[in-house]
Image (tube, rainbow, N blue to C red):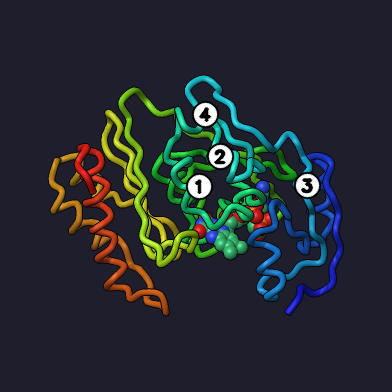
Amino acid sequence: MKASAGGYARAESVRHALDLLAGSDGQGRVLAGGQSLVAAMNMRLSVGDLLVDISKISELSGIAVEGDTLRIGALTRHAQVGTDPQVQAHAPLLKDAVAHIAHAAIRNRGTIGGALAHADPAAEFPACTLALGATMHAEGPDGSRSIAVEDFFEEVFTTALNEDEILTGITLPIAEAGEMQILEEVARRSGDYALVGLCLAKRAAGHRVALFSVGPKPVLAMGAMAALDAGDLDAAVDALSAEIDPPSDTQASAAYRRHLGGVLLRRAVARLKGDAA
Ligand SMILES: Cc1cc2nc3c(=O)[nH]c(=O)nc-3n(C[C@H](O)[C@H](O)[C@H](O)COP(=O)(O)OP(=O)(O)OC[C@H]3O[C@@H](n4cnc5c(N)ncnc54)[C@H](O)[C@@H]3O)c2cc1C
């Protein structure tokens, strides 16, 4: 099957893209790397009358340290996130995530903003940003606004972004001295979406644990975090098991996914302590 016929416009700037969306009567679709949107259009899961191509808006690309935050533009491609020295130094979780995302061709086209706006519950970047406490930045007809990551992911493929808004970038607190960030996942084959994945950040203030592929959106495992802060790994595994509601599908049962969540938490904590996983 192929996508139904529709219009296409290349936006020259964020303002231009917003005007195109505003004039599309709710039928505009933002096109970034196209790695998820085009597939969805071909399967007729996404329909719209106007593709608003933002891929040439240079102001939406790039990575920079601004004070104590790391800013990543929405159009920054996965491959760049995976090789950038500032990401390596200040948010190594994102670099590690890239190695698990699909294959080189997709990583060369896909953008971090596209992955976050797409909000696939099995994707790595949404859970990483949740573990790191990111802030999402959006631009719309009424100006710009910031959205805490805890409020951003709402449902399967659904975020707090309005249809007439564009995600322009994210900011993350830069890693503090001694901070550790770990990503663990289980997938059937290299490059497949994870059956279950887990992100762990350990800061002076405590642990942050986020899981993906365990429900309709990434989960911040508050109970597990509190138990890890108290130094009780068994209690953390029990709490995590109660906090997730994974699906059963052709890939894995809910019970197996729940079991994997605990296994990944134990592996991540072993890595924190420098033990072989
Ligand atoms: C075979 C295959 C395997 C994959 N495996 C993985 C994987 O293992 N892990 C993983 O995380 N991902 C995986 N992906 C998805 C990949 O990471 C995509 O690149 C990503 O999900 C979407 O990024 P994009 O830039 O291509 O967005 P697009 O496909 O262009 O857009 C995706 C959605 O986001 C919206 N959008 C895009 N950018 C913005 C913006 N700035 N503001 C507002 N809305 C926006 C679009 O309108 C659309 O609804 C896979 C994709 C394929 C085809």
Rendered location of residue 158, percent (x, y): 56, 60
Q: Secondary structure at mark 1?
A: helix
Name the front one of labels 4 and 3: 4
Quarter of the image with the N terminus is bottom right
Kind of residue at disc 1? Val
Question: Which residue lies at the image location 29% right of the left edge and 36% below the top edge?
Answer: 202
**For the residues bearing labels 1 and 4, Cβ distance under 8 angstroms:** no
* Separation of residues labelled 1 and 4 (CA atoms): 14 Å
State the residue in front, 58 or 106: 106
Question: Which residue lies at the image location 70% right of the left edge and 64% below the top edge?
Answer: 38
Kind of residue at disc 2? Val
* Separation of residues labelled 4 and 2 (CA atoms): 9 Å
In which of the image's four quarters is ligand 1 placed?
bottom right
Question: Which residue lies at the image location 13% right of the left edge and 53% below the top edge?
Answer: 234
Q: Secondary structure at mark 3?
A: helix
Residue 203 quadrant: top left
Rendered location of residue 255, percent (x, y): 27, 73
Question: Which residue lies at the image location 34% right of the left edge and 42% below the top edge?
Answer: 182
First in sequence, mark 4 or 3: give its number.
Answer: 3
Q: Is residue 244 above or below residue 272?
A: below
Q: Secondary structure at mark 2?
A: helix
Question: Which residue corresponds to mark 2?
Answer: 81
State the residue in front, 25 or 130: 130
Q: Is residue 126 left or right of residue 207?
A: right
First in sequence, mark 1 or 2: give its number.
Answer: 2
Badge number at residue 98: 1
Question: Which residue corresponds to mark 3?
Answer: 18
Question: Which residue corresponds to mark 4?
Answer: 85
Name the front one of labels 2 and 3: 2
Rendered location of residue 230, percent (x, y): 15, 40
